[in-house]
Image (tube, grey):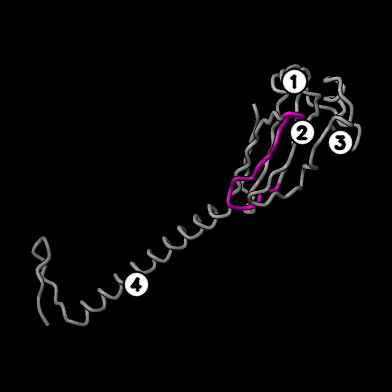
Amino acid sequence: DRRTLLPGGIAVKTSTDTILSASAIVMAFTSICVSVWTGVEARSHNRLSVRPHLELAFNAGSRSLGYTLVNNGLGPARIKSLRITMDGEEISSSSFSGYDGLLQAMGKTSADLVYDAVGAGTVMPSGDSRKILALKHDGAAGQDSLLTAVFTRTAVEIAYESMYEEPFVTRIP
């Protein structure tokens, strides 16, 4: 047994057992803190490793033009909603395609429309690509007017979530 002098002149009787006990408590507390921190970091890493990242791209090809949706993230994306507007008004849906209002405004028919079925509940795996809307045209003469009409008059907004139900939104323009 020894006597240790604390600040303020207080003498405390210490023994090897007391020092070992205090060291064990400090080590146990440190171990718990490191375990909690590791768990928090692992959870954050897991969320990031399956985060989707949807991008909308406008494509103008030699025979069609429109919007394509691509999942460039690491995980799957679950579509919550798809909203297409033209001149600020949401496009009406009275047929299977849901693009009646847009086709009518563009002077097109359903035969001019190319699209992949994407809507609420659709799951897009990482690396997947879908045509949201593509309109066929008949060469250079038809392309310019359609390009102006589609690109300047339409907007697309897609709400989606990760498998951890984290919400995201992508839109164009």
Q: Does residue 12 appear left or right of residue 21 in this picture? A: left
- Corner quadrant of residue 83: top right
For the point 68% across and 48% down, the residue is 128
Magenta-span inclusion, residue 71: yes
Determine crowd level at label 2: few under 14, some 14-19, many 20+ residues with C-alpha closer than 10 A: many
- Residue at which label 1 appears: 140
The residue sitting at the right extreme is 95
Q: Secondary structure at mark 4?
A: helix
Q: Earlier in the sequence, mark 2 or mark 3?
A: 3
Q: Disc 2 vs disc 3: which is toward the camera?
A: 2
- Residue at which label 2 appears: 133
Q: Earlier in the sequence, mark 1 or mark 2?
A: 2
Q: Are marks 1 and 4 in contact (CB under 8 Å)?
A: no
Q: Are marks 2 and 3 in contact (CB under 8 Å)?
A: no
Q: Earlier in the sequence, mark 1 or mark 4?
A: 4
Q: Which mark is residue 35?
A: none
Q: Are marks 4 and 3 in contact (CB under 8 Å)?
A: no
Q: Does residue 130 appear left or right of residue 72 in this picture? A: right
**Which contiguous range is marked in magenta?**
62-78
Circle 1: residue type: Ala
Q: Earlier in the sequence, mark 2 or mark 4?
A: 4
- Residue at which label 3 appears: 97
Q: Disc 2 vs disc 4: which is toward the camera?
A: 2
Measure how far apart labels 1 and 2 are at the Cα level. 19 Å
Residue 162, horizontal then vertical, whole percent: 63, 50
Q: Disc 1 vs disc 4: which is toward the camera?
A: 1
Measure how far apart labels 4 and 3 are at the Cα level. 63 Å
Q: Earlier in the sequence, mark 4 or mark 3?
A: 4
Q: Is residue 9 visible?
A: yes
Circle 3: residue type: Ser
Q: Does residue 72 appear left or right of residue 112 in this picture? A: left
Say if 134 sits above or below 13 in the image.
Answer: above
